[in-house]
Amino acid sequence: GHDYTKYNSWATINDWAISISSANPDLISRQSIGNTYEGRTMHLLKIGKNTGSNKPAVFMDCGFHAREWITHAFCQWFVNEAVSTYGSDPDMTNLLDRMDFFVLPVFNIDGYEYTWNRDRMWRKTRSKNSGSSCIGTDPNRNFNAGWCTVGASSNPCSDTYCGSSPESEIESKNLANFIRTNKSVIKAYLTVHSYSQLLLFPYSYKYDLAAHHSELMSVSQGAIAALRSLYGTKYTSGPGAATIYPAAGGSDDWAYDLGVKYSYTFELRDEGRYGFLLPESQIKPTCEETMLAVKYIANHVLNNL
Ligand code: 0X9
Ligand code: ZN
Ligand code: ZN
């Protein structure tokens, strides 16, 4: 069965999404943004008090990279924490009264299934590549932001294969279409990865500073200070290219260039001791501290509309 303090399979996560939505009809609605390559439905949860009017929104996805299991756990944690603290935590109540969170708990569902059944270290999608026996594209190299110019490979056998064109992956196209369609309400884009304990913002496809660099930097510093206040976990923040490595085609840079100013990539715990194999005992503390950073960013968005 489903457990917030364990890693849950895709089937369990899918059932959980249905049940938490139907248990909280006043706060959660569920919609499809399309199917994956292997035909699974990408369900997006919209969390927020239904006011009847259009509210500003934060979009957050988890599970771009299949093996980054702590990220899938975080999206589930976030949804539960939101609905279970609404009405008692004044901060969460205010956030959900005044804005919506679009949460995509698993972006790369096919890859996630593959990590459960075949290869725990799989990263990419599971699409076929013409002219190659190698499978999959790196979805975080597949967006139209300096596509395949740096830190990405044109070799389908590489773990950072950029794909045959921007949005060649149906999962990337589904996500990009949703954000393009809802661009007027989406004020922040958060994409959750692991590991390295970083909070990154544009750019990664070039060394140029983003037009909103100082605000993005100060918000990231506030967010990582909030995160650290709980258990002392140290994060570093900064523009992707200079802080982790230059890499083009990421969804964060793409969303930012589309006009979503507050665009951030989280790299959750740890710093490499366990890496992608983060023990389940760390799910709760990781999620609790990350909540503080996400709430910090959301509050900033709300107070600076
Ligand atoms: O390389 C990535 O896609 C991310 N790191 S990971 O270890 N989770 O694969 C970092 C993404 C930073 N942003 C961009 N490169 N646009
Ligand atoms: Zn990743
Ligand atoms: Zn909590």
Image: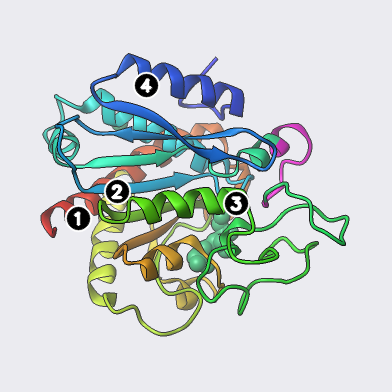
Q: Amino acid at mark 3?
A: Arg
Q: CA distance from mark 1 to mark 2?
A: 9 Å
What color scheme is it?
rainbow
In contact (CB < 8 Å): disc 1 and disc 4? no
The main secondary structure of the magenta stretch is loop
Q: Can residue 57 be found in the magenta stretch?
A: no
Callout in the foreground (2, 3):
2
Q: Quadrant of residue 265?
A: bottom left
Q: Position of residue 122 (x, y in %)?
A: 71, 47
Q: Is mark 3 within 8 Å of ligand 1?
A: no
Q: Quick one: label 1 or label 2, which is nearer the N terminus?
A: 2
CA–CA distance between discs 2 and 4?
18 Å
Q: What residue did someone put label 1 on?
A: 301
Instruction: From this view, report whether residue 186 is shown above or below residue 94.
Output: below
Q: Residues within 10 Å of mark 2 (few under 14, many from 20)?
A: many
Instruction: In the rendered structure, find residue 273 and report the number of the disc placed on it.
Output: 3
Which of pointers 1 and 4 lies earlier in the amino acid sequence?
A: 4
Q: Are marks 2 and 3 in contact (CB under 8 Å)?
A: no
Q: Earlier in the sequence, mark 2 or mark 4?
A: 4
Give the quarter the ligand 3 occupies: top left
Instruction: Give, as a single range, the part of the protein colored magenta.
Output: 114-124
Measure the alpha-carbon separation of dots 2 and 3. Answer: 32 Å
Element at badge 1?
A: helix
Q: Which residue is mark 4?
A: 21
Q: Secondary structure at mark 4?
A: helix
Q: Which mark is residue 158?
A: none
Quadrant of residue 22 in the image? top left
Would you call the spot at circle 3 few (<14 residues within 10 Å), some (14-19), or many (20 or more)?
few
Q: Position of residue 132 (x, y in %)?
A: 87, 60
- Residue identifier under label 2: 58
Q: Nearer the viewer, residue 71 or 104?
A: 104
